[in-house]
């Protein structure tokens, strides 16, 4: 794969281009998992061994999972092996000639990105703009092709017109914007087909081969489609359009099921056609700049890591609020609700990153191992530690805002929560007894996503009398604002200048817009680049997903079986009153409700 030419992008790891031998692929329409021993000797001509090109002293092959295999040298008259439909079989040297006529070289590889569901809103508003942003920053390899695939009838020109309406350039680099857009759009193509048609995907494969031109073909499929057709699309892509020479990866969008059972069934079905390391379960919140900065803040600053425990932290709050309702998504949302839509994935993933122990390294598996430990250490959620709500109609400033059940796509008697608050606990040595409070809701008074860390009161504080009875005013608080207007600030107590002794609560503030002139990349840009490079750190592993669902599934079943009625709250308010009582039970005040937020 071509090296990156921009200092704004990470260099491709050597594993990205050399580990194709470990990826599952299809050869002549048969499901095949290529092992190092089955690489045709044509890949190894001129006695080039399969070792990391960035390290001339390497003695092995760096595999996708980080393992190192024994150095491979070509053997004359070796007959390549392949796995065909799960059985070991022999591939003749003649049959292997069609695998690819190329030398093992980064300069002769290509990446084909297929957006499945290209006519949908997510593709138009997020995926294509993110791909263009990567191209704009010179983060994509020299040879790449973008294909849209959907049921809608469309020409290449019509796809380019549709995509061009949502493309924007970086604020600080607009001088060559039009030229860059034209170049990117020339690499965008479209193929119409059914999601369950192997024949249609075989036609796509033929077109991809034409654009790949005999290079090592690496293929990325982004499933921007409803979850009920995931498996059909994966099956057809795997059997009819996988790479025969490079890696094949699939990005899967949430929701990953509705509970433990459906999630496990989805994973089993995906693994009929893909290996675990080919599946990239995307949670776009993990690609947010401030979420990725969380581990940097903690592990590279001495002042924070010693405080990151029950000894100094009184509670941690994960807050997600939107100032709008379902806005036409009621039909989809009513099937999932706010707990499945936000808490079980976005907020729980951030909690795991926040609370994990120091990983052995920054390797994806080491980080994900620590996240799984956190999830498995969490106390089962109980109904008494959860509050649910649903927004009702409200008139403000002469404008009437609709109730959730006013949405025509939502049943009038729906009990689906649009708000939820929960108190969670991690039963381990570091966090024993510390409440982790989550709340998420729609149609609230503001739009925000943030992490708030409230520290313990100072023992025997000499200045208690200056704060009166409200000791919360004297509490130090670290706030990580994920969106909007990204910032990190620490609330401290400070003396107001003057002759008297008047104390004030001040912020030590890192405001990203003021500190950094560069525009913050969209989360999808980061995650797409990671998937292309084979970096799995910000993607969800299957055991991680199982642990997350195990925590929430009993609660969800209890809510549905007992038909718990959500507490109503006015559109544009701060949410149900019950959420305040829940926090007060653990002697906590929600940090986003004070005058100083």
Image (tube, rainbow, N blue to C red):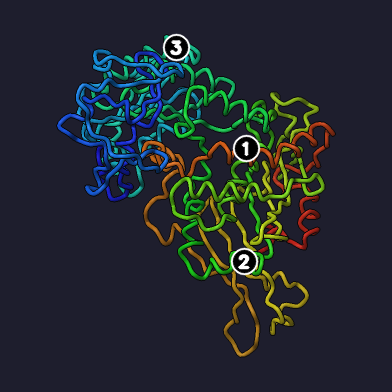
Q: Residue at x 71, y 36 (%)?
A: 553
Question: Circle 3 sits on which residue?
Answer: 198
From the viewer's perspective, is the residue at label 3 or at label 1 nearer?
1
Rendered location of residue 336, percent (x, y):
68, 31
Q: Quick check: 24 left or right of 311?
A: left
**Residue found at the very far right of the displayed protein:** 562
**Residue found at the very far top of the displayed protein:** 199
Figure quadrant of residue 213: top left
Real-space CA distance between mark 1 and mark 2, rounded to the nearest whole angstrom: 33 Å
Question: Circle 2 sits on which residue?
Answer: 477
Q: Quick check: 172 left or right of 561?
A: left
Question: Circle 1 sits on which residue?
Answer: 546
Rendered location of residue 419, percent (x, y):
72, 42
Which quarter shows the N terminus? top left
Please state which of residues 478 and 553 is positioned toward the viewer in this rendering.
553
Q: Residue at x 38, y 23 (%)?
A: 25
Figure quadrant of residue 524: top left
Residue 100 numbered mark, or none:
none
When the figure is inspected, residue 323 is found, relative to residue 356, above or below; the finding is above
Q: Residue at x 49, y 40 (%)?
A: 539
Task: Specify whether residue 533 is in view.
Answer: yes
Q: Residue at x 77, y 42 (%)?
A: 388
Q: Quick check: 129 left or right of 309?
A: left
When the figure is inspected, residue 582 is found, relative to residue 491, above or below; the finding is above
Q: Quick check: 370 left or right of 454?
A: left
């Amino acid at each position: 794969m071509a090296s990156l030419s921009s200092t704004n992008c990470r260099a491709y790891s050597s594993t990205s281009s050399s580990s194709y031998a470990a990826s599952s692929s299809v050869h002549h329409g048969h499901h095949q998992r290529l092992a190092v021993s089955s690489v045709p000797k044509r890949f190894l001509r001129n006695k080039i061994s399969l070792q990391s090109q960035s390290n001339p002293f390497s003695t092995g092959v760096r595999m996708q999972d980080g393992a190192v295999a024994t150095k491979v040298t070509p053997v004359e008259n070796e007959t390549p092996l392949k796995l065909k439909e799960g059985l070991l079989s022999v591939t003749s040297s003649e049959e292997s000639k069609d695998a690819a006529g190329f030398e093992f070289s980064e300069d002769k590889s290509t990446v084909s990105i297929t957006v499945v569901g290209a006519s949908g809103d997510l593709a138009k508003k997020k995926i294509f703009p993110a791909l263009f942003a990567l191209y704009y920053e010179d983060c994509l390899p020299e040879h790449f092709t973008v294909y849209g695939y959907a049921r809608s009838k469309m020409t290449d020109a019509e796809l380019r017109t549709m995509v061009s309406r949502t493309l924007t350039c970086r604020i600080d680099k607009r001088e060559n914007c039009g030229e860059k857009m034209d170049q990117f759009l020339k690499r965008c193509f479209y193929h119409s087909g059914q999601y369950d048609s192997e024949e249609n995907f075989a036609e796509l494969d033929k077109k991809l081969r034409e654009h790949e031109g005999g290079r090592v073909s690496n293929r990325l499929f982004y499933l921007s489609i409803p979850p009920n057709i995931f498996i059909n699309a994966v099956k057809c892509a795997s059997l009819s359009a996988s790479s025969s020479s490079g890696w094949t990866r699939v990005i899967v969008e949430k929701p990953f099921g509705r509970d433990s059972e459906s999630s496990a069934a989805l994973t089993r079905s995906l693994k009929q056609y893909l290996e675990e390391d080919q599946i990239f379960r995307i949670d776009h919140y993990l690609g947010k700049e401030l979420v990725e900065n969380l581990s940097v803040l903690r592990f590279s600053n001495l002042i924070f890591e010693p405080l990151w425990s029950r000894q100094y932290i009184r509670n941690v709050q994960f807050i997600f609020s939107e100032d709008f309702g379902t806005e036409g998504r009621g039909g989809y949302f009513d099937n999932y609700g706010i707990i499945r839509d936000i808490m079980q994935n976005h907020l729980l993933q951030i909690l795991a990153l926040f609370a994990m122990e120091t990983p052995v390294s920054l390797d994806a598996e080491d980080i994900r191992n620590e996240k799984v430990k956190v999830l498995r250490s969490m106390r089962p959620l109980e109904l008494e530690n959860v509050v649910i709500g649903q927004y009702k109609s409200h008139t403000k400033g002469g404008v009437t805002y609709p109730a959730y059940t006013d949405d025509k796509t939502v049943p009038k008697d729906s009990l689906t929560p649009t708000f939820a608050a929960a108190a969670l606990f991690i039963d381990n040595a570091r966090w024993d007894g510390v409440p982790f409070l989550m709340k998420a809701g729609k149609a609230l008074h503001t739009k925000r996503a943030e992490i708030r860390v409230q520290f313990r009161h100072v023992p025997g504080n000499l200045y208690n009398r200056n704060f009166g009875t409200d000791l919360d005013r004297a509490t130090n608080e670290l706030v990580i604002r994920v969106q909007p207007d990204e910032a990190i600030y620490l609330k401290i107590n400070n003396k107001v200048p003057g002759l008297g002794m008047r104390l004030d609560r001040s912020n030590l503030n890192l405001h990203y817009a003021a500190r950094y002139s560069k525009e913050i990349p969209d989360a999808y840009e980061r995650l797409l680049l990671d998937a292309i490079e084979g970096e799995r750190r910000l993607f969800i592993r299957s055991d991680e997903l199982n642990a997350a669902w195990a925590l929430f599934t009993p609660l969800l079943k209890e809510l549905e079986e007992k038909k718990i009625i959500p507490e109503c709250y006015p559109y544009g308010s701060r949410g149900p009153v019950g959420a305040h009582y829940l926090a007060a039970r653990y002697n906590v005040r929600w940090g986003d409700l004070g005058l100083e937020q």
